[in-house]
Amino acid sequence: MESSSEGVARSGDEDGVGGPPGVAAGETAAGSVRAAGGKAVVPAAPASLSPSRAGDFMQCPLLYRFRVIDRLPEKPSAAATRGTLVHAVLERLFDAPAAERTAPRARSLVPGQWDRLRESRPELMELFADDPEGERLAGWLAEAERLVERWFTLEDPTRLEPAERELFVETELESGLRLRGIIDRVDVAPTGEVRIVDYKTGKAPRPEYAEGALFQMKFYALVVWRLKNVIPRRLQLVYLGSGDVLTYDPVRADLEGVERKLLALWEAIRLATETGDWRPRPTKLCGWCDHQAHCPEFGGTPPPYPLPVRPAGASADGGGGSALA
């Protein structure tokens, strides 16, 4: 579900820096932030990489800094929250025996999963604070039900027995880079072949943008390969918004290429972390960014950088050492 446009960080800290982005509720002393639950989190250098945060850095290095290092709060998104809700329903559906995995049953799970979601994240009620009659909420839930129902036109859950659901994966490459993420579903055939499945509540991208969409899946395939020494037979993206299924069968060269790309990306992140040089990269996506007030492109000023900065001209391994050590 990792997607900047529709995904919300799920349970667990995908990047090893103190909780998902957007949970901070205010500043505390010594540059730390206080999460929604009251727990103080001290800013720290990045310790690992997930598909979402890799995507953030490629989209805009300053956005990566705001989310991973500064931990700036972000407003809940209706689209992203609906994606989280739909994922929860599809995960829970497999708790039922195969014959009972029907569209009516799946739709019936939506209200209860929404209750669970808002109990765990009370800030989500901000989405409907201006909806006293509940009309927008009703429409939002109805759309979630339609997305869940569309899934049944794309896959048959009565014929699926996932080996894993919402699987947290983590591995450390020979370089020392730690990769982590959450895979929506892992199917394993009787022959041992592995299929990685990810649900998207948005629409499928145009063919010229398919490679970008597959980056997340190749990331997961690389992690599974390094963990299990098995290259997944198939990567499958299920787009509930448009009713499309995108598949790709990776080979070793694909995953080696992804690994090289991630190592180069991590080196760029390491350098920016040490120097404090996080530059904005303006795109059409800026219009949806919560951090315009802190972005120089919009006349804003970033908060004071909370990590040590390597003096100009100092080598990465000299003086005080690397900020990522």
Image (cartoon, helix red, strand yellow):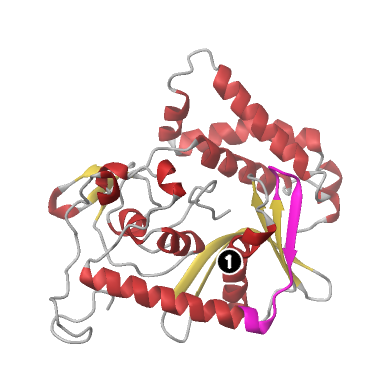
Image quadrant holding the C terminus, namely: bottom left
Report whether 146 appears left or right of 217. Answer: right
Residue 250 placement: quadrant: bottom right
Residue numbers of the magenta segment: 239-254
Q: Position of residue 139 (x, y in %)?
A: 62, 24
**Residue 66 placement, left or right of 113:** left
- Confirm whether residue 226 shows in the render: no
Residue picked out by circle 1: 215
Q: Position of residue 131 (x, y in %)?
A: 48, 18
Residue 24 vs residue 177: left or right? left
Q: Secondary structure at mark 1?
A: helix
The verdict on residue 242 being magenta is yes
Q: Taking the image as drawn, is residue 123 in sight?
A: yes
| Residue positioned 48% across, 64% down in the render | 50
- Whether 175 is drawn above or below 222: the answer is below
- Looking at the rendered structure, the kind of residue marked 1 is Phe
How far across and down, in percent of the image, does residue 17 sit? 34, 61
